[in-house]
C-alpha cells in the first residue's frame, strides 16, 4: 500500500517537473516573478527528481529579491521546489512566505528539523512526504489547512503539534509516521481526513478537542498501540468506516473511549462508537 502511493507521487511529479522548471535565477535560486503584485515564488530548478540536488548543505531564502530594478516579496515555496533534494540539510524560510506548495520538500531526507514561519497559512499536498529524518514538527497558529499526505512516511517523527487555527487534516497527512508518540490537535480542528494517522504504531493516547465534527475512514487504522481516546466533543463526531483500529475495538483489545460526563448514551446511539468501550470522564 505505502509503495503504491510512493510510486504514484513519484510518477506524477516526474511528468510535471519539466513544466515547473525554469524561472528567473537570482542568487542561485530560481523564482517565478509576478509583476502584477511584485511577488516571487521559489520554483523547481532540475529537469527530473533525480537531478534536484542543487542545494547542498544549508540554504536561506531571502524575504525579497530584486530583478530588473523591481523588488519582489518572496511569498511562496512552489510545487516541488526542493523535491527530493536529499543533500539539503537545513533551510530557513522568511516570514513573508504564506504558502508551501505540493511536494515542496518531499524526499528531503537530510532534514532533521524544520521551522515553519508564522506567516504560512497553507501546507500543500505531500509537502514533507518521505522526510524520513525529520524528528518533530510544530505547525504555527497561522496555518489553516494541511494537505493530503503532507507528512506521510516521516517515520522518525516522534512529536507533532498543530496550531489553534488548523481546521482540517488531509487524507493520510500523518500516515506511517511510525515513531509518532505525541500529537496535539490544537483547538479548532473540525475534520480529520481518511487514514490521516494510519500506521502510527507509536500512538498510545490521543485527545480530540471539542471542535471535531468528523473523523474519516480508517483515520487511526493500524494504530495498534492506541489505548486511550479522549473525546472532548459534547456532540459525537461522525465517524467513517473503521475510524479507530478495528483490531482493538472489535476483539479483545483494551482501547478505551473517554467522553464528556452524561454523554455516553449520545455517543452509543451514533454509528461507529463502541458502547462497550465508552467511559465518561
Image (cartoon, helix red, strand yellow):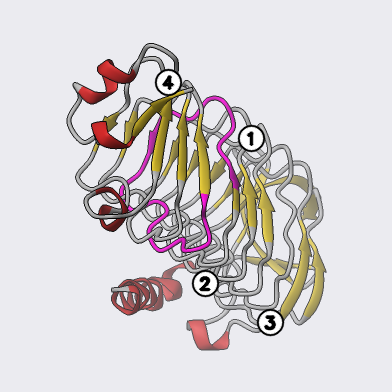
The reply to whether the magenta stretch includes residue 196 is yes
User: Residue 58 in magenta?
Assistant: no
Looking at this view, is 65 or 151 the one in front? Answer: 151
Q: Where 135 falls versus 95 (above or below)?
A: below
Residue under label 1: 163
Marks 4/1: CA–CA distance: 19 Å
Q: Which residues are magenta?
A: 183-204
Q: Which residue is mark 4?
A: 233
Determine whether the residue tagged by mark 4 lies in a helix, strand or loop: loop
Sooner in the amino-acid sequence: mark 3 or mark 2:
3
**Residue furthest toward the bottom?**
50
The label number, if any, that marks residue 130 in the structure image: 2
Image depth: mark 4 or mark 1 in front: 4
Can you tell which of label 2 and label 4 is closer to the viewer? 4
Label 2 residue SS = loop
**Disc 3 to disc 2: CB gap under 8 Å:** no
Mark toward the start of the polypeptide (2 vs 4): 2
- Residues packed near mark 1 inside 10 Å, few (<14), some (14 to 19) or many (20 plus): many
Residue of label 3:
54
Amino acid at each position: 500500500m505505502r509503495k503504491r502511493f510512493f510510486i504514484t507521487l513519484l510518477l506524477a511529479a516526474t511528468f510535471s517537473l519539466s513544466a515547473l522548471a525554469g524561472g528567473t535565477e537570482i542568487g542561485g535560486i530560481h523564482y517565478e516573478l509576478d509583476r502584477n503584485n511584485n511577488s516571487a515564488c521559489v520554483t523547481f530548478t532540475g529537469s527530473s527528481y533525480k537531478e534536484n540536488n542543487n542545494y547542498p548543505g544549508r540554504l536561506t531564502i531571502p524575504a525579497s529579491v530584486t530583478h530588473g530594478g523591481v523588488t519582489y516579496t518572496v511569498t511562496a515555496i512552489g510545487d516541488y521546489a526542493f523535491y527530493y533534494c536529499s543533500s539539503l540539510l537545513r533551510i530557513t524560510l522568511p516570514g513573508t512566505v504564506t504558502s508551501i506548495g505540493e511536494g515542496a520538500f518531499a524526499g528531503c531526507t537530510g532534514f532533521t528539523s524544520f521551522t515553519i514561519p508564522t506567516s504560512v497559512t497553507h501546507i500543500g499536498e505531500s509537502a514533507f512526504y518521505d522526510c524520513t529524518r525529520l524528528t518533530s514538527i510544530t505547525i504555527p497558529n497561522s496555518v489553516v489547512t494541511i494537505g493530503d499526505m503532507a507528512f506521510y512516511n516521516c517515520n522518525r517523527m516522534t512529536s507533532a503539534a498543530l496550531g489553534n487555527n488548523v481546521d482540517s487534516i488531509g487524507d493520510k497527512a500523518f500516515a506511517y509516521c511510525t515513531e509518532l508518540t505525541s500529537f496535539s490537535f490544537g483547538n479548532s480542528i473540525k475534520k480529520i481526513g481518511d487514514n490521516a494517522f494510519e500506521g502510527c504504531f507509536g500512538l498510545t493516547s490521543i485527545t480530540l478537542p471539542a471542535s471535531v465534527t468528523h473523523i474519516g475512514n480508517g483515520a487511526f487504522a493500524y494504530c495498534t498501540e492506541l489505548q486511550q481516546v479522549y473525546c472532548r466533543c459534547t456532540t459525537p463526531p461522525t465517524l467513517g468506516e473503521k475510524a479507530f483500529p478495528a483490531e482493538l475495538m472489535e476483539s479483545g483489545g483494551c482501547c478505551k473511549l473517554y467522553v464528556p460526563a452524561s454523554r455516553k448514551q449520545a455517543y452509543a446511539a451514533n454509528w461507529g462508537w463502541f458502547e462497550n468501550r465508552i467511559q465518561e470522564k
